Structure formats: C-alpha cells, structure tokens
Amino acid sequence: MRTGWADTEQADLPADPVAPYTRARRERLHTLFAGHRLVVPAGGDVRRSNDTDFRFRPHSGYTWLTADQSSDGVLVIAPDGSATLFLRPRSDRKDDEFYRDRRYGELWNGRRLTLLESARRYGIPTRHIAELEHELRLAAPTLVLRDVDPRVDRLVPANDSGADAEFAAALDELRLVKDDWEIAQLEHAVAATTRGFEDVVRALPQARGTSERYLEGVFWLRARVEGNDVGYHSIVAAGAHAATLHWTSNDGPVRDGDLLLLDAGVETRTLYTADITRVLPISGRFTPLQRDLYELCRQANDVALACLRPGAPFRAFHRAAMAVLAQGLEDLGVLPCTAAEALEEESGVHRRWTLCGSGHMLGLDVHDCAAAPADRYLDGVLEPGHVLTVEPGLYFQPDDELIPAELRGMGFRIEEDILITEDGYRILSADLPRTAADVENWMHRVAS
C-alpha cells in the first residue's frame, strides 16, 4: 500500500493572478500594526450533523490576504512584516492519514497542494500547520482574528484590551475599497447571476407544478456551474412569502397572478458574490395594482441612486428612498399621518411597511465588511471603489389589518449592485430590467 506511487509534484504550478494584490494587502495591514504578530485563520470544517460536515468555505479576511481556500490554514504576519502560511498539506503516502483519515486523507477527500505548490501558487512561504503552536509561543505582541478557529483562539489567550476587536475592524475597513481585481470578480459574479435570473424565468412553467424549490434549484445549478456556490441562501419568495425579508424555506406554491420576489447571487470561484433582487409577475404580466406598487418601489430606487457619488454620506440614499416610499404610503391611504410626520425620528411609522435599511456593502461577503468602524462605513461617506447594494422595499404582511385587503401579502424590492466611481456610480447589474414594462418585455423575450 505504501509503495509504487508516482511523483506528482506540480513543479510548474503558475502563480495565482491575485498574488500581487494579496501581497499589497498584507503590507497595508502590517503598516497599521507594525511591531505586532498578526494571526488570521481560515477556519475549519463545520459539522452539519453526526459525521457530516458542511462544504468548507474560508473566512473572507483570510482569503483576501492569501487567495488560499483550503481548510485549517493560518496566515501569520511577523512583527517585521514577513508572512508565512501554515497549512495542512497533501497527505504523505507513507502516513496513515492518506488511507484512513476521513477528513484529510487524499483517498477520502481529494488532493491538497503540497507546501511547495502552495508557496508557488500564493507567493507566500509555507510551513506545516503542526509547527504553528511553536511559532505562536515565541515572544511577540500578538493580535488574532478571533472566533474563526477555536484551536487558534486557545493557542493565543485573549486579553481584555479590545485590541483583537480593533484588529478585526481594521481588516474589514481595509476591504471596503475594492481594487481592480476585485471589481472584475464582482462583475463576473453579477454577469453569472443575470444568467441565473434568466434561467429562473425560463423555468417558471415547470415551477407552477412543483414549488419555489424548483426555482431555487434552477438558480443553484447556474451558481455551481459558473461559480463556487450561491453567495447566500437564495430568497425565492412567491406570493405572500415576498413580505418575509429573508424567506429561505422556498417551499411555497408558484401560482399565476402572484408575484415572485427573487433575491439571489452567484458566488465566484474566487468567493466574490453578487446580490440582486427582482420582482417578477409569474404570469408574465403585472396587474394594475402590482404595477403601481412596483413602480413606487422603482421610483424610490431611482431617487436613491441619484444620491450616489464620492463624498456623499452612506446613509443619504436610504433617507432619500424613505421619503419617496413614505409619500407613496400616504397616497395609498396607509399611513395614519402625513409622510412628513412619519419620517420624523420620533415617529418612523412608515417603517412598519419598509422594515429595514436600503443597502449594504458587497464583496467577499454578501453583507461585506460588517465589522468596519461606523465612522468609515454606516456613518461615513462613499468613496471610489466602494461596491454596495441599493434595495429599498415595501412589504405588506398578509395579516396586516391596518392596510386595505388588496395590499396584503405582497412584497416589493428592486436591488442593484453598484460601483462608486470617481465621478458618480455604475450599475453593475444594469443588464437586468428595472421598469415594470421592461420586466414584462424581458420575461417574454427570455421565455420565447
């Protein structure tokens, strides 16, 4: 069993195209914390049930700094700025792991890169993960990205200074502005997602005889063929399910006369995700009321987009969208007061039907850079290279007795993926229709 194996070392493995970018990112991070040892783990497998794990996906901060996507890896940046990747490499045929280890054995789970292959691929010196404990015992002030790998957390006891939280926030802050390589990945994610939406439209006739899960599966097929996976659980919400913000059971009926709210994104093989929402009439045509409510939501989206430019407050587009939706709710006779009164901070009654914010940063995570300091994100200003979503919505719950019966059980959200440019913005998701008329024409064309 242990003899007769060919030498399959990939001596000519090319460098990953992102390696120059990851090197620059590590240098920027080191500059912020010079003199500290910085520890960023990938994380490990997460148990789904019994002896079955979820498919592994590394922590976004780790892959942003390394490009590596293997489990159990740990990036260590020394106080002088030199970096080392501690990895679990390919199984040695002379070791029982190759034959018997159900998690890491090559016969069980496939080939990992060797340490030398990883060094060539990612442009970072590598060492075996078994050497990490000794490395972390060497004297040096150390900052750890916590709550990613329990083993790493145990090796470096936390203190109460808040320094690790500051480190995590700084890492997310660095990821806010996307470089050219990242923008290209997001463009690819959006293009694949657009094709996934077209797949769903073509599958509507078959879904009418099954459920929302048919459409979920159709989109997931596109995500797996063109990318790594879906970037988050797809929201395939027909009928009243559209009023549930994060509906992911996706097991309801798909019926003519109802609307389908589809919120989905393809995650690329480099782990960048799109996040797009469209509302589709399942029959191919909006009713007059559906059209009016859709267009109200679209008008709010248009007004929000008009606020996007470098230097604009991040929250400005949400406030602008809420002003449009509050006025629309007043015109519908829904508000118990005027729109102006509803928008006052001490009231906010319009939120009963708008529910949440109107957008978020987008990148390696669907809600990207969530740990970034508020003054650089939510309370900050937009900068060229920011990629964000714009998605104001209206949600009428099926049991809401404060609204007319004909409004109940509908939800509307149009979500665009946006790149902030030097002089304004670019809609990355522009290949999908926005107006009600364009949605109908697009659906007819795609289904034909």
Image: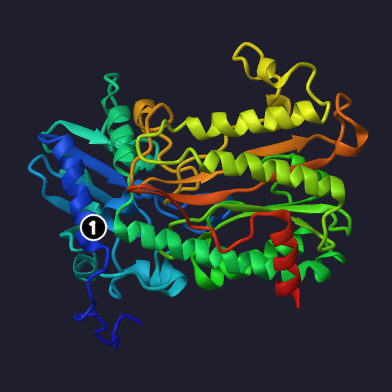
Residue sitting at x 36%, y 66%: 97
Q: Is residue 190 left or right of residue 247?
A: left
Residue ranking furthest to the top = 346
Q: Is residue 389 left or right of residue 263?
A: left
One can see residue 128 in this view:
no
Report how many numbered discs are placed on residues in the image: 1
Badge 1: residue crowd in 10 Å (few <14, some 14–19, many ≥20) = some
Residue sitting at x 39%, y 27%: 374
Residue 325 location, x and y as percent?
68, 32
Q: Is residue 262 left or right of residue 155?
A: right
Residue 376 location, x and y as percent?
34, 31
Residue ranking furthest to the left = 80
Q: Is residue 116 left or right of residue 337?
A: left
Q: Which residue is mark 1?
A: 21
| 149 lies above or below 340 | below
Residue 438 location, x and y as percent?
69, 61
